Image (cartoon, rainbow, N blue to C red):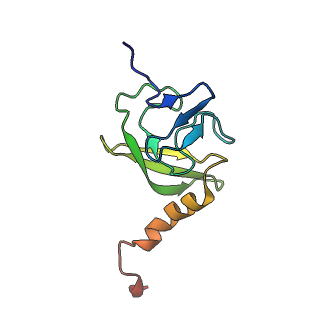
Amino acid sequence: MSRDTSARKKTHSGMFRCKRCKQMVPNQAFGTKHRNHCPMCLWSLHVDHTPGDREHHCHALMEPVGIWVKDGGEWAVIHRCTQCGEFKANRIAGDDRDWALMQLAARALANPPVPIDEF
């Protein structure tokens, strides 16, 4: 019996069901060649060593923990694996929910590492 290397339940319609929020997600999206996270909740699966190879052994959920603004202004979601702790940066896709991205970006401001009243 072979293991489903995508770690997602694929359907015949080119979609998969998010393991976190259970929403149906299209395999393709504007701005990315390899769908690696849910556009609704931004969670991902730890399935790649390099984008699109689907060869990582972990297959655990990856929590969105931050936003990285790359040179040129492109945003990427930083994910941390809930099992092995590895971090990965994944470029955002054209259909990612704006509100979910903004909530993630504001998380650091909502929980600063130092008291804000000292500034």
Q: Position of residue 67 (x, y in %)?
A: 51, 57
| Residue 62 in the figure: left or right of residue 52 | left
Q: Residue at x 51, y 50 (%)?
A: 42
Locate the C terminus by quadrant: bottom left
| Residue drawn at 36 percent across, 81 percent down | 115
From what the image shows, is residue 118 above or below residue 23?
below
Q: Nearer the viewer, residue 11 or 4?
A: 11
Specify whether 84 is left or right of 102.
left
For the point 43% across and 25% down, the residue is: 55
Find residue 39 and report its horizontal and vertical position in percent.
57, 48
* Number of marks in picture: 0
Quick one: which residue is furthest to the top in this view? 1
Residue 64, how many percent across, how many down?
A: 45, 52
**Residue 61 x/y as whole percent:** 39, 42
Q: Nearer the viewer, residue 64 or 69?
A: 64
- Seen from the viewer's position, the closer of residues 96 and 75 is 96
Rendered residue at 50%/61% (across/down): 104
Q: Is residue 78 left or right of residue 76?
A: left
Give the quarter of the figure containing the N terminus.
Answer: top left
* Above or below for 53 versus 100: above
